[in-house]
Image (cartoon, rainbow, N blue to C red):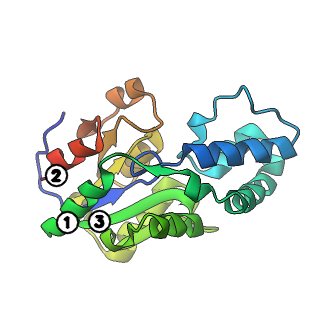
């Protein structure tokens, strides 16, 4: 499973759980939002809600009727508490991006369910913008990973056969499969490893360095 059988031209990275450990800021944001809805999140496992679209998470947490209200509040609180600055890059990921970028072999892109302005702020804060030819995240018109990937590939006119998605959750795996592109899964993010082991992926990667070993 850990050897590539074809050459790719475009690597599409997820962000949360793949490049950046965003859990401190996201946990704090979810906790504050749920407090506003009268829900005590102190004993809840919020890790399954890092990566999926907010619409999926808040439909589950507060119900469909108040989902949009919760999403708007989440975005507001996320900005107010400077959640981006509470996150940190995974060890070695900057070196991975630098070497992939410098190799000239690949176009690098980001496809994330993070809110687009928050993703752009994070890339700027960590000085990662230069590595990516395009950055696609959640907007009012594209909410789910499959839609985000589809719009990216269509806008760039990339051949699906030349694309590889790298992400940490089943949302990344399913989003890639819905678009007919291959996917490699990192196991250091937020998904349970056993789920990824059962998934149809071209590789399981236990550290950022393994991404480099696979691609170069």
Query: To which residue does mark 3 refer?
Result: 108
Where disc 1 sits, the SS reads loop
Which residue is pictured at 20% across the width and 61% down the height? 100
Residue 39: x and y in percent read 83, 35
- Side of 65 relative to 127 (left or right): right
Residue 215, disc: 2
Residue 18: x and y in percent read 39, 47
Residue 24: x and y in percent read 59, 44
- Where residue 40 sits, quadrant-wise, is top right
Observer-nearest residue: 172 or 188?
A: 188
Task: Compare marks 3 and 2 and give the one earlier in the sequence.
Answer: 3
Asked if residue 63 shows in the view, the reply is: no
Residue density around tag 1, few if under 14, some if 14–19, many if 20 or more, within 10 Å: some
Residue 211, disc: none
Distance from disc 3 to disc 2, alpha carbons, whole Å, reads 12 Å
- Where residue 34 sits, quadrant-wise, is top right
- Where residue 59 sits, quadrant-wise, is top right
Which residue is pictured at 56% across the width and 46% down the height? 52
Where disc 3 sits, the SS reads strand
Q: Residues at badges 3 and 2 in contact (C-beta under 8 Å)? A: no
| Quarter placement of the N terminus | top left
Q: Residues at badges 1 and 3 in contact (C-beta under 8 Å)? A: yes
Residue 76: x and y in percent read 74, 62
- Side of 195 relative to 63 (left or right): left
Task: Compare marks 2 and 1 and give the one earlier in the sequence.
Answer: 1
Residue density around tag 2, few if under 14, some if 14–19, many if 20 or more, within 10 Å: some
- Side of 52 relative to 126 (left or right): right
Which residue is pictured at 46% across the width and 34% down the height? 191
Asked if residue 213 shows in the view, the reply is: yes
Residue 106, disc: 1
Q: Residues at badges 2 and 1 in contact (C-beta under 8 Å)? A: yes
């Amino acid at each position: 499973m850990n050897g590539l059988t074809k050459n790719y031209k475009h690597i599409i990275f997820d962000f949360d759980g793949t490049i950046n450990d965003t859990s401190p800021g996201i946990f704090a944001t979810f906790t504050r939002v749920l407090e506003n809805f009268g829900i005590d999140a102190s004993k809840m496992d919020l890790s399954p809600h890092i990566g999926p679209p907010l619409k999926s998470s808040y439909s589950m947490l507060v119900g469909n009727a108040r989902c949009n209200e919760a999403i708007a509040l989440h975005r507001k609180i996320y900005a107010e508490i400077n959640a981006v600055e509470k996150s940190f890059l995974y060890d070695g990921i900057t070196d991975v991006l630098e070497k992939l970028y410098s190799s000239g072999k690949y176009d690098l892109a980001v496809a994330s369910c993070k809110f687009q302005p928050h993703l752009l702020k994070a890339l700027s804060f960590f000085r990662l913008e230069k590595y990516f030819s395009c950055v696609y995240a959640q907007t009012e018109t594209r909410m789910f990973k499959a839609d985000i990937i589809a719009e990216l590939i269509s806008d760039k006119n990339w051949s699906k056969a030349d694309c590889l998605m790298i992400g940490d959750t089943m949302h990344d795996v399913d989003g890639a499969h819905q678009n007919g592109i291959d996917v490699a899964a990192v196991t250091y993010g937020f998904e349970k490893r056993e789920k990824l082991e059962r998934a149809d992926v071209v590789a399981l990667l236990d550290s950022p360095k393994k991404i480099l070993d696979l691609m170069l």
